[in-house]
Amino acid sequence: MSENAILRAGPSRVVAPVPIVSAAAQTQPHRVNIAASHVDVFYAAKQAIVDVSIDIGEHQVTAFIGPSGCGKSTFLRCLNRMNDTIPICRVTGRIAIDGEDIYDPGMDPVQLRARVGMVFQKPNPFPKAIYENVAYGPRIHGMIGNRAEADEIVERSLRAAALWDEVKDRLDEPGTSLSGGQQQRLCIARAIAVSPEVILMDEPCSALDPIATARIEELIDELRQNYTIIIVTHSMQQAARVSQRTAFFHLGVLVEAGDTETIFTNPRDGRTQDYITGRFG
Amino acid sequence: MSNTLLIAGLLLLMTMAYVHGRRRALSSAAGRRVALHSLPSYHGLYIALWCGLPALALAILWLVLEPSIVRWMVVASLPEAQRSLPSGELGLLLNDVRNLAPGNVAGRQPDAATAAAVETYRTLKSIVFWAMVAAVTAVAAFGFEVGRRAIAPAFRARQRVERTILWLLVAASTIAVLTTIGIVLSLVFESARFFDKVSPFEFLFGLEWSPQTALREGQVGSSGTFGAVPVFAGTLMITIIAMTVAVPVGLMSAIYLAEYASPRVRAWAKPLLEVLAGIPTVVYGFFAALTMAPAIRELGTFLGIEVASESALAAGIVMGVMIIPFVSSLSDDVINAVPQTLRDGSLALGATHSETVIRVVLPAALPGIVGSVLLAVSRAIGETMIVVMAAGLSARLTANPFDAVTTVTVQIVSLLVGDQEFDSAKTLAAFALGLLLFVITLGLNVVALTVVRKYREMYD
Amino acid sequence: MTDAPLPIASPRRPNLSRRRARRRAAERRFRWYGMAAIGFALLVLVVLIGGIVRTGYGAFLATEIGIDVAFEAETIDPAGTRAPATLSDANYRTVLRKALAGAFPQVTAQRDQQALMGMLSSSADFRLRGMVLDNPSVIGTTQRVWLKASADIDTLRKADDIAVATTAGAGALQLLADGATVTLRAGPGAFTGLFADLAARRPDAVTNGRATLGSHLPGYMVETADGGLLRLTSFTANEATGDILLAPEAAPAQWFTLIVSPPEGDRRIDDRELAWYRALDAQGRVRTVFNTTLFTSADSREPELAGVRGAVVGSLLTLVICLLLSFPLGVMAAVYLEEFAPKNRWTDLIEVNINNLAAVPSIVFGLLGLAVLLGFFGMPRSAPFAGGTVLALMTLPTIIIAARAALGAVPPSIREAAMGMGASPLQTVLHHVMPLALPGILTGTIIGMARALGETAPLLMIGMVAFIVDVPGGFTDPATVLPVQIYLWADAPERAFVEKTSAAILVLLAFLVVMNLAAVILRRRFERRW
């Protein structure tokens, strides 16, 4: 049961300061934003996630790492119920955002996804104008009354995604005409536009070159001020660079979660140790 | 039947040539297979091809040319009085001769001259047939000998055979092009003859269509008027009605099947929809005439509207039903080609499924959908049996869907089925209509296929 | 990091719950539209097939009437030679007329006897001749022969749309004959029921307490226990006058009143024929059997004698030609285009051309056939050979496209492996690629053939629309095909042909179902995903 205790260790319960502590980790203890407990996920009869419990704090970046096929993306997609679109997928356990169970029958996944935005592995702008890409979300949620409001949201979101200066003169061009990195920032702007509380990022840089990756990472760090961000990555360097907290998944099991510094310098579990030192994965 | 026997005989000869070739090749290498450059069967094929192909080509050429030559010879043998008949009557006479030749007892006794012509025809036929048999056999024997001489252990039979087969393949692939050329030439040629009699301007812009030409010379109103506008207006109206049914139903079915239906529902609903596409059009025609038209008439009477018994509405609705599976299966493909990531992107923003479909999937699939609708329109315009059985014959310029209208295909059928005389404007008009029909559907198809192909490339 | 954090203003989310409800409703509505669309299409399918089965199943049944026929030697073979020529030329109509006279001795007027003959199919005397020729020993005997009923009687029995309401009559019925008319009495108020019925249905037929009947009004009749039938021409509540349809005994023990609707003027069977039919039926001399004629004979002007055999054979002959031409040519063209053709303008042109040809209206192929095959090459009109050629040209693109898809689905690794062994390109295709692609090619071919089987319009153009009573025996005989037969019968004015048309459609659909099932099974069996 000791392992379970570790798994349950949310940020508020972190007591033992590890010798080397980054500035980020030294900030105020964060309020718990997302609380998952005993989550299992099945694809038909195959179990993909086994009894995962984790607390995720507000306004910080949490990274999910692990070898491919370890279930980190699957778990991420549980947090905004994107798994609902896969008919054979079944989720049990409890996931609560601000204390509200998101798998409650009364919870509308559509409203949930307005609160929990998502950025995908491959940039997927709609084949529409850049402007329309960003305005789409606010429109369907009725957040836009007139053109001026739309303009304002589009500009604010594009600025927040650090894309405004690059595209402000070509808002009518299709989103697909941008470069890969710009497309991904457009997708981030699109997610921000509906004012979510949480942004999920599923390997957002895996399709990008190093320069574009650096820009996105920079952006993620800025966005942390206003959003809870969860990022799935297979790059340990990226996790170390952008996240304050890290969770390590292996074979559908959450092996260890804690401050990024701790995980990378002083992991408690042997498997984590093996993974971060490159012995598998 | 005798021609079938001839072809069968030729095939038998080819088989014998093949067997002989094999044996000869083996014996030329003194029974050692490895000494041969090519396998014995290639040597056999080599002889068989030499034996069969030229003879077959000759037989086909002969059969194609034979009727006109025999006809010419029969005409030459006729007495002067009949030879100078107008071409139409001469044609009828020759038709009689051809029908009487096999010994069929016609209703009336042929006159002496016809009987003589029948005798000539019969003799000529048999002479020509045996001449053909002789010529074909000679060519086959010659080819057999040529092939036989070539056989030697070092002979590259495989290369020769393969090259010949490749040429045959090329020839087969050009048949489709030849068909198109045949269509275009025959339509253009016959239409040109029509436009000698009727000005193209009148045909394209004339508002009155009554093609009934006189049966007797000099009958009143013998000319007939050929203004195709009402015919095209009728086609357009029925097509619009059909599309009004087919596009919403087909598209919504496709959306439901592609986006909402569970795999189980999909597994039975899709084949059932395809059944609708497999039903022959003549069955739809029967349904339109027997069930739909009276139903609409009754409904009209109930609502106090006067409905013609061959209303455009009945034909159009049934045609729309026929086209539903066409629209739905094409749209289904197109919708499935939209990448899942776009749907995920929209869903992740909190869009409902229908918002995602309407605002993201459909706009992304629009070119493909437009293409499939264009293909459907082209099919509706060219559809024949439903309108022949359920739409009217008289061309009327009207915008009332409860009226009877006629269509291009109905007119083609009614002008060409039944007694017809070649060369009359009435018969030729059918080809002019056919040419226009071909041009319009071809245009629609080219545009639609290009749009669909561009669309496919976009997401590949 | 360098910029100050951007302020994210709190979003404007008006009337959240109302908006959410609206969006949910829109979602439900949209889903419902989809289901409604599919439901509509499937409903039409059910109505279509159901309607055809409903109107068509009757054609698989035929009505027969049993007549006791005396094969008298003096009529058939007075000389007693039994020579086939004599037997063949004998007047069997006379035999038949005598037999019918035996069944209905009361019918004496020539006109009525003619009508009696009309209840049997016009082929009845051929049937008798056939019996005698097959077995001359029937001469001199009397046999019950089951003869095909005419189309009207057949329809009467199947459609069963003449309603006869029977009520037992009260009191002893007295019949007073006066020439052709009869006065009926059975005590006061014996006809009150009939009177009330007519007064309710057609008050205009009643004046001063007397009803006057006619062919525009429902039939009111009196039937006696011994089989007599009287048609009333006028009646009051107490008394009636009428005509004799079938003569009753003078004082019947029991009687019934009948109300027959619709009126005589609205049906094809008049009261007399109805009476005869009821009499025959009551004697067990009418039966319904499986209609073998439908499958053994070709077209006919008489609905009860028309069958689909000529059309089925014509369709088969046409399809044979179509298959022999389109399959080899289509496969060869596909092999060339997929395996050997260089990528250049010419092959591009062929490809675009094939795709477009697949979408050319079928009637245009008919025009091609008329102008080129009949006009230029002089092929025989109305013949399966010309029809098959036209259909082959039409099916060719379908087969080429299917065959190319099947060939293209074979992975290149197979070709590389064969080439690596030193096989020539042609050997590679023939030995390795073709066998793997064959199920796909065959599936496409069967589907193409099924389409060709259902095709009508181009065949109309080349004259396969003629009325042909013989089953075609060869590829150049005049013939028609099933769909054209359907078209011809659908146009025929006789009501009995509606049933035939539906039956022919069912036969056609049965062929199509078999072909498509074959394609599905082939695909299930051999389809391989690489």
Image (cartoon, rainbow, N blue to C red):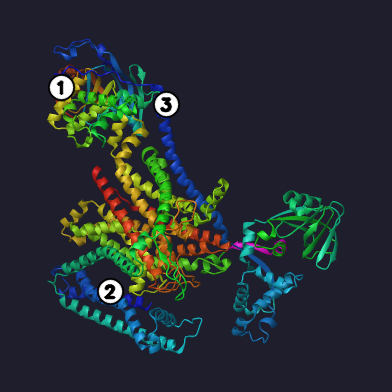
Which residue does the image show at 48% across and 52% down from the upper left?
A: B314
The tag on residue A196 is: none
| In this rendering, position of residue C499 left or right of residue A40 | right
**Residue closest to the eye, C458 or C342:** C458
**Residue closest to the eye, C428 or B26:** C428
The tag on residue C21 is: 3
Q: What's the chain of the residue with tag 3? A: C
Q: What's the chain of the residue with tag 1? A: A
> On the rendered image, what quadrant is the N terminus of chain A found in?
top left
Q: What's the chain of the residue with tag 2? A: B
Among the 4 quarters of the image, the one containing residue A117: top left
| In this rendering, position of residue C2 left or right of residue B390 | left
**x then y, percent, for residue C53:** 53, 54
Q: Is residue B337 magenta?
A: no
| In this rendering, position of residue B426 left or right of residue A247 | right
> On the rendered image, what quadrant is the C terminus of chain A found in?
top left
Mark 1 and mark 3, same subunit? Answer: no
Residue C149 visible: yes
Among the 4 quarters of the image, the one containing residue A219: top left
Amino acid carrying label 2: it is Thr
Amino acid carrying label 1: it is Arg
**Residue closest to the eye, C36 or A71:** C36
Determine whether the residue tagged by mark 2 lies in a helix, strand or loop. helix
Which residue does the image show at 71% across and 56% down from the upper left?
A: C218
Amino acid carrying label 3: it is Ala
The tag on residue A241 is: 1
* Disc 1 from disc 3: Cα separation: 43 Å
Against C60, residue B327 (above or below) is: above
Q: Which residue is mark 2?
A: B15
Magenta-drawn segment: C279-290
